Amino acid sequence: MPQPPTYVRQYNFTAYQTANPTDPLPGDQVDLELNEVKDTLDAILANLVLIQRDDGSLHNNSVGLDQLKPEVVLGVPTDWVTATEYAAKAVVWQSSILYVCNTAHTSGVFATDLAAAKWTAYLDYADPLADAAAYAALAQTYMDGAETAQTAAELAETHAELAETNAEAALADAEALFATITLPWAIAQGGSGANTAAGARTAYGSTAIGDALFITASAAAARTTLGSTTVGDAVFIAASSAAGRTALGATSVGDALFIAASAAAGRTALGVTSLGDSIFTVASEAAFKALVNLEAGTDFNAYHARLADVAAVGVTDNAVLIGNGSNLILESGATLLTSIGLGTGNSPQFTGIELGHATDTTITRTAAGKILVEGKGVIKHTSSSYTSGEVTFSTGSASGGSSGDIWFKYT
């Protein structure tokens, strides 16, 4: 690309302003001058793009050997040695690093010369050389592996030839053996002695069920041959242990018991509480008593000697267990009635009596010598006659009665 055009001023604005101090600058001349400036700037910017990146660095591939000064070009490097005359710009190798001589000098100790700024590190090849050494070692490893593989292949070929020889010998032995065998092969010769599959199964001792299993057409038919029920068949073909338990009719609790990983997990599946679980696993009677914490006389009645009286009596019909002042005994009949105050020599008192287990024949007492039957007064006859307003007679008329008779009061 050519160099940018040089800006050349086209108009003398100073002379115009001197001659016309009150007039504005001529616009057409201003535009012309600015256009000339723009052309030069545009060309400069276009050329700048060729040598500068957006980050301000030199553009890639913009510098070559032609652009370098002679003093920038490096000579052929040599290994650094002591007691040697080095001119400025001389290039040496030291510890895989390329150094450029800054000032002419006679070398002494490299570290001392470097500290005196007689050398400047130019390129560090330490890592590339280490990588190259590593790759070389890896290449050698691959070569060693290849040689090992070749050795293994040669050994495999030797084994293959040996196997072929052994196979030929085995074949010869088999042919000799077959020459001694008659068909059908006897059981002693590794055969069955039969010409048919059914005969072979019989020769091997197969039962009718075993024979049916051998020739069954399907797994389902085989299970039927074995006598499997519908449930058994479902268990046989269950796709999982859970499906098998379901086929057995296991409930969710039963299923949890089946798959419980431990006794404790099984008790949990049964809904056992923490107390119940402790009772299940108690180690001794003493531990059980301590766990339930039951105290005689507080949580339950303690043993009493009267229990021995109860245990000693029989189961006599119509007898009642009753106390005699010292012990509990059985009594019945007149003895029992006397003990409870209902004997023939007793005079029991009742508020009322229901006759015949009925509530319509109730006898009650109202006063001394007076009783009522269903609220009707019963009167003892003490005079020779009563009026019809006082008593009701069996004949339906007010006639006399005898002294001592009982009559119902008339109402």
Image: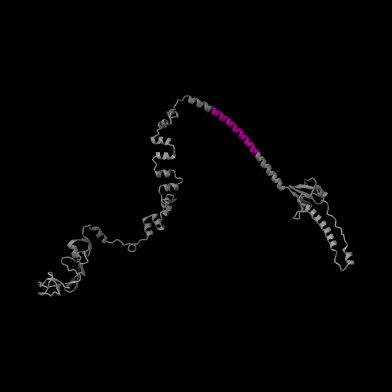
**Residue 403 on image: x %, y %:** 10, 72
Q: Position of residue 355 (x, y in %)?
A: 19, 65
Q: What's the residue at 43%, 46% (across, down)?
A: 244
Q: Is residue 62 left or right of residue 403?
A: right
Residue 29 lies, with reference to residue 71, above or below; the image says below
**For the point 69% across and 44% down, which residue is it?**
133
On the image, which quarter does residue 344 sit in?
bottom left
Q: Which residues are magenta?
A: 143-168
Q: Is residue 86 visible?
A: no
Is residue 403 placed above or below 49 in the rendered structure?
below
Q: Main secondary structure of the magenta part?
A: helix
Is 199 or 77 nearer to us in this picture?
Answer: 199
Whether the magenta-drawn stretch holds residue 134 is answered as no
**Residue 310 appears in view:** yes
Q: Residue 137, position in %: x, y? A: 67, 42
Question: To which quarter of the image does residue 161 belong?
Answer: top right
In front: 153, or 402? Answer: 402
User: Residue 160: within the magenta?
Assistant: yes
Out of 229 and 80, give the one closest to the viewer.
229
377, above or below 207, in the image: below
- Residue closer to the observer: 356 or 35: 35
Quadrant containing the C terminus in the rendered view: bottom left
Q: Which residue appears at 66% of the width and 42% of the height?
A: 138
